[in-house]
Image: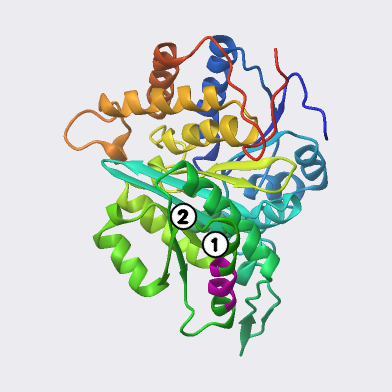
Amino acid sequence: MTQPRPIPIVACLAGDGIGPEVMAEAGRVIQAVSSLMGAPVRQVHLPFGGDAIDKHQHPFPPHVRAAVKASDAVLLGAVGGPRWDSAPRRPESGLLELRKELDTFANLRPVRHDGIDLMVVRELTGGLYFGEKMLTDSSAFDTCSYSREQIERVAQWAFRLARRRSGRVVSVDKANVLATSKLWRQVVTDLHAAEAPELQLTHELVDSFAMNLATRPGAYDVILTENLFGDILSDLAAAMGGGLGLAPSASIGLDGPGIFEPVHGSAPDIAGQGEANPVAMIRSVAMMFTYGLGRRDVGRAITAAVDEVLAEGLSTADQVHGGRAYATWEVGQAVCDALGHHATGSAEFADHPFGRVMARG
Ligand code: IPM
Ligand code: MN
């Protein structure tokens, strides 16, 4: 698709566990910005993950695949749960197929809370997740491979974000052991020299980096790393910054729709009780407007509204220490109410690479 649609289509994949509950609040916030800020969006709801296995015997059925490819952005709740542990296909495999299908190689996972301000840039469509695999009763293997091009394109995202932030990037690898990490370090070093010498680049080994991040999270800004390290380190980073209830993500490719989803999982233990924290999902909606739909003003307004609500201490149980724990819908409603204080009258459009641009006017 080359021409932006006047009203962008967002494929909403609520998924499993708390996914539908937090997706409902995302929908409310989208409605609110639609009327307050002139940012209308068409939401198309589709089954995904375990829910789609139940309905269509596949976590990412063909009709969902077609709808997602025709959309302008994908909003995702969460997938997985114990119910599908012994299913022939796991819900998570649908998520991996979705990422691969849209080639969303750059996974941006910001953490901003109480003086901590991190941006994990995780490579998302390579490495151990997607290499050749084998499993029998007596042996198994997973293959990790990376090409120069795969490393370059995600490193470019880290550099691009660092320019808008503090200018510092740490690249995390295991170059003392892994061949893929040796290549990773070389490619990032070369690209830095060629395209971003003004940025301050450092390299750290993943084990000691994990320790440093846990003890001195304030020392870092942009963290660039490969798929599996990024999976682990982004949970750690989220834990350092208020917990998974607050952490959003954006997964972006060269073109085509991006995927916007909370870092947290389906939390089956609290599903259906109205106590899940919708903030990670709502912040993912903000990232969708900024990076996926080119409406930075809307992304900024949603972010400010969330910050206001958090500052008031109006939070779900995971964030409350002492005071009353609010329900999922109450936090969502509070964000919608706060949007009135932050909605600006004039639309501000971002240009590529910050996503596609919504039709102007
Ligand atoms: C994440 C999740 C996924 C991943 C799982 C559900 C496949 O943990 O988005 O971080 O490992 O990438
Ligand atoms: Mn994870």
Q: Residue at x 57, y 22 (%)?
A: 30
Q: Is residue 75 magenta?
A: no
Asked whether mark 1 lies closer than 8 Å to ligand 1, one says: no
Q: Which of marks 1 and 2 precedes in the sequence? A: 1
Q: Residue at x 27, y 42 (%)?
A: 115
Tell me if 287 is positioned left or right of 56 in this view: left
Q: Is residue 188 above or below residue 11?
A: below
Instruction: Report the Cα–Cα distance between label 2 and label 1.
Output: 8 Å
Q: Position of residue 174 (x, y in %)?
A: 47, 77
- Numbered tag placed on residue 199 in the rendering: 2
Q: Position of residue 307 (x, y in %)?
A: 35, 28
Label 2 crowd (10 A; few <14 / some 14-19 / many >=20)? some
Residue where numbered disc 1 is placed: 192
Type of the residue with mark 2: Leu
Tell me if 98 is positioned left or right of 264 in this view: right
Q: Is residue 22 above or below residue 206?
A: above
Magenta range: 183-189
Q: Is residue 148 above or below residue 332?
A: below
Q: Secondary structure at mark 2?
A: loop
- Numbered tag placed on residue 340 in the rendering: none
Q: Nearer the viewer, residue 86 or 352?
A: 352
Q: Is residue 179 above or below residue 186?
A: below
Q: Position of residue 148 (x, y in %)?
A: 67, 70
Q: Quadrant of the C terminus?
A: top right
Res 263 seen here = no
